[in-house]
Amino acid sequence: MNKWESNRAWLLVLPVFVVVAFSAIIPLMTVVNYSVQDIFGPGNRVFVGTEWFREVLSDYRLQDALVRQLIFSGLVLLIEIPLGIAIALTLPARGWRASLCLVLLALPLLIPWNVIGTVWIIFLRPDIGLLGVFLNSVLGIKFDHTAAPADAWVSVMMMEVWHWTPLVTLLAYAGLRAIPDAYYQAARIDGASAWAVFRYIQLPKLRGVLTIAILLRFMDSFLIYAEPFVLTGGGPGNSTTFLSIYLVKLAVGQFDLGPAAAFSIIYFLIVLVFCFIFYQALQNVATGDKQ
Amino acid sequence: MARIDLKQIAHSYEAKPRGDEDYALKRFDHVWQDGGAYALLGPSGCGKTTLLNVISGLLAPSQGRVLFDDRDVTELTPERRNIAQVFQFPVIYDTMTVYDNLAFPLRNRKMPENEVRARVHEVAEMLELSADLGRRARGLAADAKQRISMGRGLVRQDVAAILFDEPLTTIDPHLKWRLRRKLKQVHERYRLTLVYVTHDQNEALTFADQVVVMNEGRVLQMGTPQELFEKPSHTFVGYFIGSPGMNFLACDLVGEGARVAGHEIRLPPGIAERARAHAGPYEIGVRPEFLRLNRGGGDNALPVTVVDVENLGNFQMAAVRLDGRTVYVKLPEGAEVPAEQGSLDLPPEWTRLYADGRLVE
């Protein structure tokens, strides 16, 4: 093969380069550009180095939002993953019932995110909302997500779990259906209990889809914006101000583009690092040889 | 270890079977002797696996009873029947070590850990898995995984029978013989009842003392490999066993003999007489191994046209035409084959007569 022919391979990957450049590298460089300069207007900017980074890192509101965000994402994973698997285990394996269940489960996933916030605002209203009236008037529990931070958290969590657990369920369900019958038959012959079947057959076989589920749910919940913004607006006070809500306040509300850009980069790195850790951990669970 | 009786067993996957064709297993009786090595041979979809699952208890038969040593186990789960089964694809518990895999059935039965250890080491020794006991099972080769599945059956000392459902399908050819030899050793050592499902006749014939041939949900014949070869009780068995299978030629009965394509040939004495008690159509069957091809004449011969001769190393395979049908003849290496016209010799002692597909004896 001559040199031209082997170099021609580079031309074949050129379209990918172009797409990646426009989809990721160029927008990211714009952000980097903002994060290291103080821009007053066109042609009027000052290089400030790492000043914005130092500023946002020492911002206590940002630190609070980060802690809130970590707690939120942690809770999301702790609730949605086990719950999603549990629901998947109880679904019928085949037949029209299976199809019906899957369609019903997938409904929350089909609703636009800001609509979900609106749906839950109405659902939770103490005067006309189904759940709000039920809690306040029937059970006599005082519940108002616009007044009490704890109620706001419970509301956001309920909405999040309702919205996204079906995704975990669908993934886990697909994983379960892919397990050959012979495994269950062998387990019956070996006298395995239902728990042992779950622990030694189903869970290990779900590792692949659960890796995807955990990564998706972590990223999505860590970047959550629309639903809590619509439902609580980050309040009451700052109690449900998550990172992206704070970021938007910074960038759009206060027009502090420099700090917002610096913060965006830090945000991006946090997500990247966490995903890397999760991925590595989940890979090692299965491949780690005891020897 | 146990003798397994199947009494009037039939199974259909339909809730309300209408006719015979809805049955994956058609009603029959069968006995598997204690300590026997059986192969269950038949084409795909003939009901072998269904039969195996009925024995193991994974499937409750629609009709009939399953007895282990005269004890009715029809309603019992596989676990209670104490049976072991090895599947087509190796089933291992991925996250466990080889040791834990082998110990799993015993631990589920709450055996004390020191006994578990003794059993696992004994079986691992037998199956040449001792060196791998500490390793994760998922990293092993397919044949080692199949040995683990087998080991999970063998660790239970009192296991009634081990059932194999085409266990060599996913194994590389060069490892097959090793695993098959291991199976034989296991059988010789433990004298367990083994039932081995396969669609590969070589596997069946080398592994088993008794081969059971099935087709379309029926057991057609059970016998030693030699019996199946020399006296197939059904045309399907003759055709299915052997490579190529038995040659069959339509015939009429004439006195003590048969007329094939206008030529009369002799049959073993008394056969034609007995065949008249059964309805036709009649066919004669001769193995390619027993046929001889001559230039002409011959004692009990039919005139044929030689179509093709293939040299297959240590033997030759000749295809000849007789009245529009192809007959295969297996000839020794170097035997002279007539160029075009020849005569086909049918030794009467190896010529079988079939009435409506069944052997006349």
Image (cartoon, grey):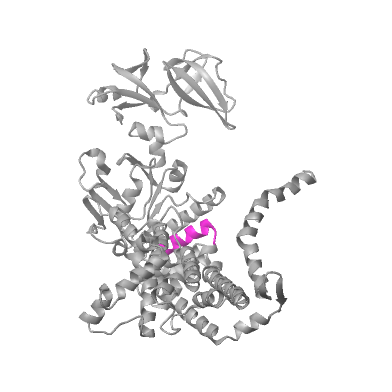
Report which quarter residue B23 is drawn in.
Answer: top left
What residue appears at the point 42 percent right and 36 percent down from the top-left corner?
Answer: B241
Quadrant occupied by the C terminus of chain B: top left
| Residue B120: image location, x then y, percent | 46, 70
Q: Is residue B25 left or right of residue A50?
A: left
Q: Is residue B307 left or right of residue A57?
A: left
| Residue B141: image location, x then y, percent | 54, 58
Report which quarter residue A166 is drawn in.
Answer: bottom left
Q: How many labels sit on residues?
A: 0
What residue appears at the point 48 percent right and 82 percent down from the top-left corner?
Answer: A68
| Residue A26: image location, x then y, percent | 65, 63
Q: Is residue A261 left or right of residue A245?
A: right
| Residue B175: image location, x then y, percent | 55, 52
What residue appears at the point 54 percent right and 50 percent down from the top-left corner?
Answer: B172
Q: Main secondary structure of the magenta part?
A: helix
What residue appears at the point 42 percent right and 71 percent down from the top-left corner?
Answer: A227
Q: Nearer the viewer, residue B144 or A257?
A: A257
Q: Indicate whether residue B143 is drawn in magenta.
A: yes
Q: Nearer the viewer, residue B148 or B202?
A: B148
Quadrant occupied by the N terminus of chain B: bottom left
Q: Is residue A53 visible?
A: yes
Q: Which residue extends farthest right?
A: A3
Highlighted range, magenta: B140-155
In this rendering, the answer to whether A211 lies above or below B307 is below
Q: Nearer the viewer, residue B21 or A140?
A: A140
Q: Indicate whether residue A246 is drawn in magenta.
A: no
In this rendering, the answer to whether B229 lies above or below A98 is above
Q: Is residue A165 visible?
A: no
